[in-house]
Amino acid sequence: MWDISDKYTVSEAPAGRAERLALDETRFRACFRAFFYGELLPRVYGGQSAPLDEAREWLALWRERGLSEGDHDVRFARCLVQAIEDESAASPLDSVYLAAYRREKPEITPEDREVVLRVIHDRRSVRAFHDRDIPDALLARILAAGQHAAHVNNLQSIRYIVVNETHEPWVFRGVDIPPAHQHIAVLQDDRCYQGGGEKNLMDRIVDAGAATECMLLAMHAYGVDGAWLTYNDEEQFPRLRARFDLPDYMRIVDLIDLGYGSQTPFPPQRPDVAERVIVRV
């Protein structure tokens, strides 16, 4: 079985130009993001010197591979390099080249805070559903919430299988899978983590968990119910892998059952936070 609990090997980062050109496109893009989001951008934020020669080499390799110059990753990377080179700006962060990416921190009103906290506090795990479809446009918003979760080095590894039980009956059901009307499997493209370094098991688990939690909160905000399923079924995952012809590098991490709930679970009882703080200094 191939799942998130497998042991991962940390690959060596591709060191030279030839090795980088030889990468498949998915891994090349992941290494590209790891450099610009994980190495170059933190240096800009920290006011440190930036490895511009390597940045220019990555941009040249992007062009040499014939990848789209309009892609969001390369557009940001190019602007970042131009901002670092901009001698007219007090700092790269003040450069006109990054103006399109600059956002003022929006004001969060007391009413906004109450709504956010209400969504967090009132969400429930629902396991009984009406036989009613979630509109495709609403499903897209839920999936987009997962894409906006925090993600190590912006590697963008998250992938989805989205199934309507009417079209694919029983493929998602196991011993304790509730009979949801629709399902989302959260997957990761393992190639995104093959850029070397310490992007290992913990990074991957956190990335998938963050995406899943963001989708659960978005579901609740839109009036959609569901449950987060994290168990690893010895029949379920191979069945999904075989039915949808998943390649080996696509790892199934967890599942979400969702739909319009036909039950209202009792709120889980939580201890006071003071009882759970074991150190405060």
Image (cartoon, helix red, strand yellow):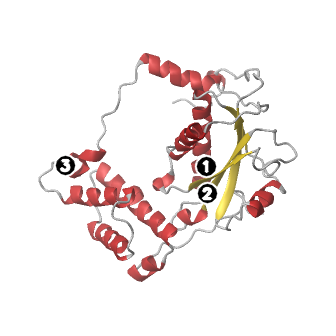
Question: Which sits in the foreground, 258 or 251?
Answer: 258
Say left or right for 77 vs 176: left
Q: How crowded is mark 2: few (under 14 residues within 10 Å), some or many (20 or more)?
A: many
- Taking 5 as reference, is 217 above or below it? above
Between the C-alphas of marks 2 and 3, the distance is: 36 Å
Taking depth in this image into account, of 97 and 71 the one nearest to the observer is 71
Locate residue 252 relative to residue 120 in the image: left or right. Answer: right
**Type of residue at label 3?**
Val
Residue topped by disc 1: 208
Label 2, on which residue?
188
Can you give x and y, in whole percent of width and height, for residue 27 in the image? 51, 68
Residue at image x 51%, y 67%?
26
Distance from the alpha carbon under mark 2 to that under mark 1: 8 Å
Sequence order check: which comes first, mark 2 or mark 1? 2
Q: Residue furthest top?
A: 111
Residue type at numbered disc 1: Ala
Q: Mark 3 points at which residue?
A: 96
Let me know if residue 159 appears in the view.
yes
| Residue 139 image offset from top left, x and y in percent | 60, 40
Tell whether label 3 touches label 2 (CB within 8 Å): no
Drawn side of residue 244 relative to residue 205, left or right: right
Disc 2 to disc 1: CB gap under 8 Å: yes
Q: Could you classify mark 1 by the number of other residues whose Cα lies within 10 Å: few (under 14), some (14-19), or many (20 or more)?
A: many
Which tag, 3 or 1, sits closer to the chain's start?
3
